[in-house]
Image (cartoon, rainbow, N blue to C red):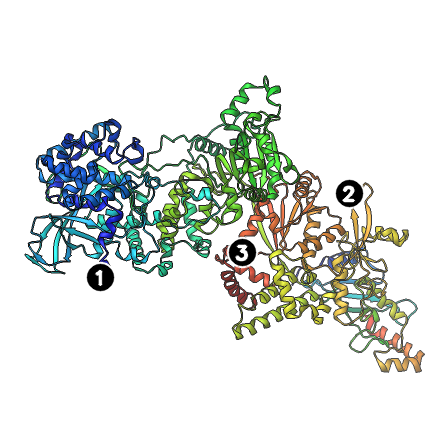
Amino acid sequence: MAALPKRIIKETERLAREPVPGINAVPHEDNLRYFDVSIHGPQGSPYEGGIFKLELFLPDDYPMTPPKIRFLTKIYYPNIDKLGRICLDVLKSNWSPALQIRTILLSIQALLGAPNPDDPLAPDVAKRWKEDQEGAIATAKEWTRTHAMT
Amino acid sequence: MSFAESEGPPTKKRRFFTEKPDILDSSLGAEPSLPDEIDAFPTAAAVEPYQPNGFDLSIPGTGTPSNNKEPQSDDHDHIPGFDSETFDSFVGDKVSPDVLKQLREASGDNLERAVNMYFDGSWKKKAAAVSTGSIGGGTAPKAMTINSFARSGTSGGHENNGMHEEAESPPIEVSLNNTMPEYRYVGAFGVGAWATRSGTTLLKHGESVRIERQKIQPPKPTVGKGKGRPAVTPLKPNSAAAKRVDVIVRFTNPKGEEVGRLPRETANWVSTLIDQKVCRFEGTCVYAPERIRTNDTIFLQLRCSLLRTAFDNRGFKPSDNRKTGIFEEKESSEEKDLRLRQVALVKLFEEVNLLPSRTSETTAKYKREGLLQAAEVAEQYENSKPKKSNSAENVGSSPPSAEEVEEGKELEQDQLDTLYKKAQSFDFNAQAAEPAETFAMDLRHYQKQALHWMMSKEKDEKDESKEVSMHPLWEEYAWPARDMEDKDLPQVKDQANFYVNPYSGELSLKFPVQEQHCLGGILADEMGLGKTIEMMSLIHSHKSDVGMRLDGASSLLQSVNSLPRLPAASANVERAPCTTLVVAPMSLLAQWQSEAENASKDGTMRSMVYYGNEKTANLQALCCEANAASAPNVIITSYGVVLSEFNQVAARNGDRATHGGLFSLNYFRIILDEAHHIKNRLSKTAKACYELDAEHRWVLTGTPIVNRLEDLFSLVRFLRVEPWSNFSFWKTFITMPFESKDFMRALDVVQTVLEPLVLRRTKDMKTPTGEALVPLPPKSVDIVDIGLSKPEREVYDHIFNRAKRTFAANVEAGTVLKAYTSIFAQILRLRQSCCHPILTRNQNLVADEEDAAEVADAASGLADDMDLQSLIERFTAVTDDAADANVFGAHVLAQIRDESDNECPICSEEPMIEQTVTGCWHSACKKCLLDYINHQTDKGELPRCFSCREIINTRDIFEVVKDEGHPDTKWSLQRLGSNSSAKIGALMAHLKALRNEHAGTKSVVFSQFTSFLSLIEPALTRAAIPFLRLDGSMAQKARAAVLTEFAASKKGVVLLLSLRAGGVGLNLTMAKRVFMMDPWWSFAVEAQAIDRVHRMGQTDEVKVYRFIVKESVEERMLKIQDRKKFIASSLGMMSDEEKKLQRIEDIKQLLS
């Protein structure tokens, strides 16, 4: 594997030195572009109390292209599909090389607090969210308890 | 063999040359046994008194022996007259007074003629006719008469055996140091002659036979011309009649009746030897039929003796061409005679089987073979009709046509290497000389050795440790001690040998020493060894008598001497005893002047650049002997000035004096720097330089031979090294053997020419102790691969494909040569597009390629090529609207400044590399920003700011330029031109890195395209890198100023140099980095440019970067560079046609 760009090294160091509250990202020892990430569910959201595991991978042309991120922990959320893929503009068209792992993870944490059923990735979840928001939130809490709190 | 054609009308001939037939007749009677004794002539005392008489008789009033080489006349001036005793002893018989009287009448009291007449019996019949004839024909060819007479005098005594003793003891050897008998036996050979008449008892075995010549001859040359040479009758080369009949050699029996002729192949050369008074032949009949019928074979033995006269004409006359100067040499009749003689002598030695006892080692093994080849060629020439004479050009037998002389064969690289290797056998133990005290610099040891060598050359001191060596072109032969009948031959004291120059047919009794009369030479040290300094030390250390006196007289007389005086006689060329004239290429004038000053203690050197406006001075008045005290010690001028003044003087019909310029003086010394400027001896510049007068003549060049032997000739001609400065001589001994594939011999001869003349050391020479001659700091040459940007590649591909198509089409149609210009221009475009696409649109191309390109443009309609136009347009956007950051407001500036220390948001470099801002003032590294923009456009998206997602206008990207030269760092924004090129980008990156790592390091940037330099300039300006520029379009003064500034500057200045203007001579050792922006066809040219920096005086490691575009024509050019042949064409040495063929080969490779 090619030498790790300075930028990745710096980001990794910085994540370790100045960790973001509620977010933890640690690179794999055998692949420094591959990170194990955990995000605490934001307060006041159905995901509060849960710790969600994600995987993050920095492609070769990072930071020209965005990192690839997916939830490993099952989550009931209109913008995250069954496979854990996330619908987030900064991970796609709105990516900018000025963004970093840290900022992206913060965005994801914020996203959990503000679901957007109008731009769904999981259509059934989005539909329920629109038609029966309370039921949906209850299911989300339920899922958080079952999957994110063990 | 045509009998008919040899039937010339003999009587008619006799009318013009009365004496000659007579003389020949007189020797007719010589008995075969006699010459044995006659050879002993030097001891024949009895003959002595008669000789002078005969001499005086035949040349009344001419007492100067030097003219005729009959030195006896020195001792005997007594009355010319018809002394009967003399006559008797000549004819070797007592003649009755009656007969004597008749003879006197018939001969008009001419003893010689009388002797002749006595022997041929003609006095009886044609007394009257002869006496009238003698008036008309007797006066002109005096020398000839003398020689013939002398011969007839000694040989005429055949009837009297008592003559033998007389003939054996002439006191000539006593009175003359270097004399030999009138003739001396060298050998004998047999020949089967043929009879031209029938009859009985015409000739018997053992009878002596007289060998005689009759031929049609043009009118005799004037007396003057006969001087100092045998009175050879020049053959009219164009007279076909003369050519056909002029070799007939008849033989007559003792009664004087013609019996027959020698066979043609023998007669061919025997006739030459007789005509040119080289040899005498005495025949003896070995066998003849009793009844001879026409065409019978008669066997003769010919006894050959070399005549003394043959040895008299030593040396070549200085060639006249030097004086006539402007005219091309043609082979004169003299030269032709010489050639015939050369061939004849070789044949003679072959027939009599005489081998040299000593030849020059180096040439010995090639000589014979080569000479016989020459003989063959010469024979061919003999046989060819005049109209065909051009076919024999390679032996120089006909006037060289203009074309031929211009060509001359090229040396292959390995031959050149061999030659140089030989010329470089430098003796490290050679003596060294200390420079004069006025010389202000320290010389290295080898430079002191050069000084010693040069001083000894100028003072013509013979290096005594050196053995006197025989001139390499000569061979030594021992005189035979026994004749063909094994009888002892008398020997001459101190004359056991004679010497033959088989190349020219010259003979000599004296040991031919290899001499050099040239009081100068060729200083051919390799570039960077300090030729200029060596020369300066010579100027200080060896001065003329006048110069020495002035130094001694010191200041006492200075006040008087310094008053300018008018030269005494301004009508002549004045001596300039204290002045050295330096002729150098224009770009080096300033350097010479500064070196002259640096090398001299204060006040000891007056130098003057004679160029441009300074030319108003009257040099003659300034430098003549009368003003020697104030005359400039060194005048520095350019080849151009020499040429233009030469033309002016020529326009005044050669009136050098009143012109008052360079040609009005005879300098103490002339130095031609970079003397390969005159390598073409036909060029006007070369001819002009030949005409400069000086006591000492020097040429400086790193390459005395660029690629053909004639290059060296021009130098030798300038140096006036005899006899090599005669082109015919040169041609015969060097060009001809070389062209007839006898390289080694030619090169050996060249080496012998070079050896005493040339001092050459190379940089990689090692002293015996293994040290380098000049320890130079290391040098590294790296090739920097350049990847073209996408738009650049598009332009390149476009041009490449078109060139390939054109070429393929032309190959198919067989019109490659015709379309050469167009194809070549397209290659040029390709090379330019590697540098910068805009270049392909630039009109200011390299001079010699410009026309071709324009023609090709017109031909291919390139100008209307919209496709390419649009591709290139991207590069022609507005360039230099340098923007001051202040224009954009303080907050912008503040933001940029603040961000400048931040890390790059994209790559996290800290600080940013080449901070660049977007139109929305967000900063990143230049590369990161551009990469990101490319990344987006590649995906077909509009580029947006990485920070605020504003759409980025690619023209609104600015590089932040910090000019650290100012006390407060000055900030400015420089619009990032999309008009830059990959190469410029790479250069800028290198220069910026250099500035960061080694601030203050100077660099030199070479390109062959001056227009490319013009594109680099704004890039340097943008990056606030100080630069200077020097190219061919600049005036001398401006160049000097640039060089001075470059040397003086304390900053890391970049010098932009055009490969052509800067490739030669300049000293740029203050720079430590060299950037070669584009490859040239031969690396030698680039190497020379690099050596401007990496040369003596360089103190640091030199790093050279060659920018080569990957996967392009440039890469292939590197491969071509490896091919040796291309060196020649790139230096402009090949004919246009050759060049084209060569390059087409290369183009094939380039477009493959």
For marks 3 and 2, give the one nearer the viewer: 3
Check residue B4 in the rendering and tell me which mark sits there, or answer none. 1
Q: Position of residue B1061 (x, y in %)?
A: 61, 48
Q: Residue at x 87, y 51 (%)?
A: B886
Mark 3–mark 1 distance (CA, rounded to whole Å) = 59 Å
Mark 1 on the same chain as mark 2: yes
Are there few (<14), some (14-19), or many (20+) residues within 10 Å of tag 2?
few
User: Mark 1 or mark 2: which comes first in sequence?
Assistant: 1
- In the rendered view, does B181 fall on the left or right side of B583? left
Look at label 1 and name its amino acid: Ala
Q: Nearer the viewer, mark 1 or mark 2?
A: 1
The quarter in which the N terminus of chain B is drawn is bottom left
**Tag 3 secondary structure:** helix
Depicted B1141 relative to depicted B902: above or below: below
**In the image: residue B992, left or right of residue B509:** right
How many residues crowd mark 1 within 10 Å: few (<14), some (14–19), many (20+)?
few
Point out residue A135 in the picture as x, y percentages from the top left corner.
92, 80
What amino acid type should be assigned to the residue bearing mark 3? Answer: Ser
Q: Position of residue B930 (x, y in %)?
A: 75, 61
Q: CA distance from mark 3 to mark 2?
A: 42 Å
Closest to the observer: B340 or B1126?
Answer: B340
Question: Which disc, if any, is residue B1130?
Answer: 3
Quickly name the residue at label 2: B965
